[in-house]
Amino acid sequence: MNILKLSSVMSLVFFSVTVNADLNFYHLDVNQSDSTLIVGPTGKSLMIDTGENGYGDEICEAVKKVGISTIDILITTHYHKDHYGGVDELANCGITIGKAYDRGHRNHLVGKQTFDNYLNAVEDDLTAVKAGDTIPFDTDVIIKVVAANGHIEGESNTPTGEENDDSVAVVISYKGFSAFYGGDLELHTENKLSSADVVMNVSVYQANHHGADNGSSSAFLDDLKPKVIIISNGDHKGHAHPRKSALRRMQDTIPAPVIFQTNKFASEGCNRCDLAGNVDDEFIADLDPDDSNGSIVVSVKDDGSFTVTVERDYGPY
Ligand SMILES: [Zn+2]
């Protein structure tokens, strides 16, 4: 095992086979989509988004490797299929889904196949959240909703109609550690958060919108001042994420964060490829463009210190 000390509160570990911590975040490679499994101090589990249609089985494999058979809490950031498409496959593979939270305002989606599959998987216990809400999870772990439907706390909860900007955004806090997850937020909602200084000084920031250019503004990053940024991006063509321009803003943040990617973007065969960039290979989970099986694991101890592990496979954890 190669351990590189990055700061007094964080270390980077390659190919760890055992993660021994109070609170673990598994950022799964689900290609151009999003899914993060979080396991709390008493073993309770939380999942933020369930990946694209067809990736539920891979998420299921990763969840079972962690030793989990129930997702106690599911948060769906928004209704794009790369964030909730895999939920039915996850349920069908034998993973029980407990309480589910989303942004509400679902009526216009009824009858669409991906949404109906989602509803079948979660409708037994589904709650709509708004900015300012707290989602109960595990001992000493606080999940605060900081934005939903394009609004921050104290504003109306009427959606903007821009699905990305309507994403549910949360800050997960534990003993001095904090992490921000905002789905596919873009500048409209980022600007609201940064103008009101809602989220300041986090340990980990999962990059909004897969590292797109229309997220991760300099003002937003300057509020968050993340020690670590994790980008959930695909390996081919499509949207060409992460964008070089967004990476540059992240790298220019003071103090400089350490940036990780779930996937190496293969810069070939598409007309927007030259817009995408990559961090150095040692900070990327999946270097092979022909599969999807890596993860970036953040492990938090009970003093708030944390470790980042680059897993080139789905565990063993
Ligand atoms: Zn997305």
Image (cartoon, rainbow, N blue to C red):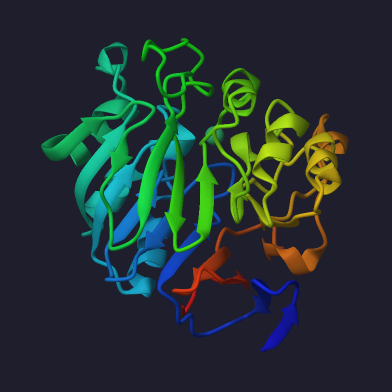
Q: Nearer the viewer, residue 85 or 213?
A: 213
Q: Nearer the viewer, residue 56 or 268?
A: 56
| Residue 33 in view here | yes
Q: Quadrant of ligand 1?
A: top right
| Residue 237 in view here | no
Task: Give me the residue at 52% from left, 37% from top.
Answer: 182
Q: How many marks?
A: 0
Task: Give me the residue at 21% from left, 59% from top.
Answer: 94
Left or right position of 189 against 144: right
Left or right position of 170 against 264: left
* Up/down of 121 relative to 130, above or below: below
Residue 312 quadrant: bottom right
For this orientation, the residue located farthest to the bottom is 1
Residue 256 quadrant: bottom right
* Quarter of the image where the N terminus is located: bottom right
* Up/down of 98 relative to 242, above or below: below
Estimate the x, y position of residue 27 in percent, counting from the top left.
52, 57
* Up/down of 231 relative to 9, above or below: above
Estimate the x, y position of residue 56 in percent, counting from the top left.
38, 51
For this orientation, the residue located farthest to the left is 124
Estimate the x, y position of residue 286 in percent, counting from the top left.
66, 62
Residue 198 quadrant: top right
Task: Give me the residue at 24% from left, 27% from top.
Answer: 116
Task: Give me the residue at 44% from left, 54% from top.
Answer: 173
* Up/down of 86 relative to 11, above or below: above
Estimate the x, y position of residue 141 in percent, counting from the top left.
36, 58
